[in-house]
Amino acid sequence: MPKHQGSFLKDLPPSIKRCKYHGESQFFDVLNSIPDRFEASMDTSEYVLFHASKETIQTIFDPQNADTSIRRYCRAFDTNEELILAIMALVPHAWAADIMNSMIRDNVSQMGLFSSLRGYPGALTERKKTKGKAPDYGWGPKRTARGQPLSPSVTLEIAMSETEPKLNSDVRFWLNPDEGNADICLTLRINRSKPEIRIEKWVWQNDRIHRSQVTWITKKGEQTNVSHHPIVISFESLFGRQPTCPREKDVEISQQQLEEIAETIWEGQDW
């Protein structure tokens, strides 16, 4: 996958609803309509792309307004393109982020490093005050070099009905050294029409974005199948340093853990 050129929001697929921002009341009217539209059509996205003035975006994303209700639903912004990406995350999406965090935390706890890992649940990473993006979840070392901005080294992006271009846009942002500057981006795609989940691991390698692993989790009857496991997150990528003792090692999300992740998501889908 080539490095992203231009705005990561301007190039989003047409399946994501577009509308002009007309204030907080209209913002929530649009978001609150998503669950009904989602049930009515397999092509409906959980996301909405709002066109708003640069001044409006700067006000919403002013650090002093971090606790505003609108801010909590915003996943990305670009002041140059005057765009805000918002989401009404539905149950399977929210549960997927939570269970993935639990599995990674469990692995890290076994190394005695639970308190050394910082979580980024929907936390915004800003670049040059003109654009920013929040992952579904992110992780990184609690201690970073002085002057280094706080941002995740490993990110997770989840999709239910979004097209491949949406996920690819997410990956390009996170792995671009000039934007998200993460080491690993995990994408988790939930199939809405059958119990099927795809997890991909993307890395920055040789000046390009490279997909290094694809794992499928499927179910037929009572049988759950997992391909290409475990999912491995290197210790150095997660913590930004080399291991210093035998218990510090790569995070491995096992077949059993992947099955548990899938069952949690499928429960939210009523499979």
Image (tube, rainbow, N blue to C red):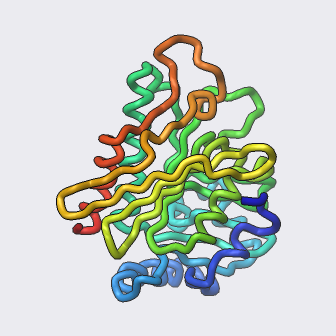
On the image, the x and y values in percent for residue 248 come to 51, 19
Q: Residue at x 22, y 56 (%)?
A: 223
Q: Can residue 156 be seen in this view?
A: no
On the image, the x and y values in percent for residue 173 come to 70, 57
Q: Decide: is 161 above or below 172.
A: below
On the image, the x and y values in percent for residue 219 come to 28, 61
On the image, the x and y values in percent for residue 128 come to 81, 54
Q: Residue at x 36, y 64 (%)?
A: 196
Is residue 200 found left or right of 13 in the rendered image? Answer: left
Q: Which residue is drawn at 56% across and 65% down?
A: 74
Q: Decide: is 64 above or below 194.
A: above
Q: Is residue 128 visible?
A: yes
Is residue 173 found left or right of 109 in the rendered image? Answer: right
User: Is 262 or 75 nearer to us in this picture?
Assistant: 262
Image quadrant in which the N terminus is located = bottom right
Farthest residue, direction top: 245
Q: Residue at x 74, y 61 (%)?
A: 131
Is residue 260 found left or right of 144 in the rendered image? Answer: left
Quadrant in the rendering for residue 21: bottom right
